Amino acid sequence: MAELIPAPTRIPVPGGKVIDEYVGRVTTGTESVSVAHMVAPGGWSEPAQKPEFDEITVVLRGTVLVEVDGEEGGTTLRVPAGQAVLTRAGERVRYSTGEEETEYVAVCLPAFGPDLAHRDPEDAE
């Protein structure tokens, strides 16, 4: 049956980033997928992680930088407004923003959960 989601749940995180979850473990109890709208300040970054979920990031405004570890030492993808990036479960990635405030939507399959992100402990706050 269809379910109206009247408002997202604001997920508190450090560093000035705002996460509003529309669908996921917190708002709807959905474990198969999560959809969140995010706004991060310019120069924001989070610890590297090796998540157990695929993540699709659609950039609406600003630029998301995605550091991806690979066989050849890794690369950084610049994802400007109007573009998206798909990272795969098991890849070590680190997200940050360019100099300007950045707005984006993240879709995680299965749904995001802090215990599934496997963030690097040396960077964790």
Image (cartoon, grey):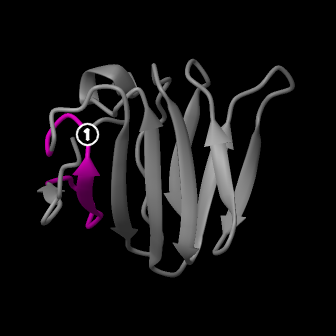
Q: Residue at x 24, y 41 (%)?
A: 125
| Quarter of the image where one finds residue 86 | top right
Q: Residue 78, relative to residue 101: is it above or below?
A: above
Residue 63 position within the rendered picture, expressed as x and y whole percent measured from the top left: 60, 70
Q: Out of 80 and 15, give the one closest to the viewer.
A: 80
Q: Which residue is mark 1?
A: 24
Decide whether the magenta segment is chiefly helix, strand or loop: loop
Give the extent of the magenta segment.
Answer: 12-27
Q: Position of residue 121 (x, y in %)?
A: 34, 25
* Residue 107 makes an appearance in the image: yes
Please tell me which residue is depicted at 38% across the width and 27% down the height of the picture.
117
- Seen in the picture, residue 123 relative to 117 is either above or below; the reply is below
Residue 15 among magenta residues: yes
Picture coordinates of residue 59, whole percent (x, y):
57, 67
Q: Residue furthest right?
A: 72
Q: Residue at x 68, y 36 (%)?
A: 68
Q: Position of residue 29 (x, y in %)?
A: 15, 33
Q: Is residue 108 left or right of residue 22?
A: right
Left or right, 75 with reference to 99: right
Q: Secondary structure at mark 1?
A: loop
Residue type, numbered disc 1: Gly
Number of numbered labels in the structure image: 1
Q: Is residue 98 visible?
A: no
**Magenta stretch containing residue 101, yes or no?**
no
Q: Quadrant of residue 103?
A: bottom left
Which residue occupies the foreground of this view, 57 or 95? 57
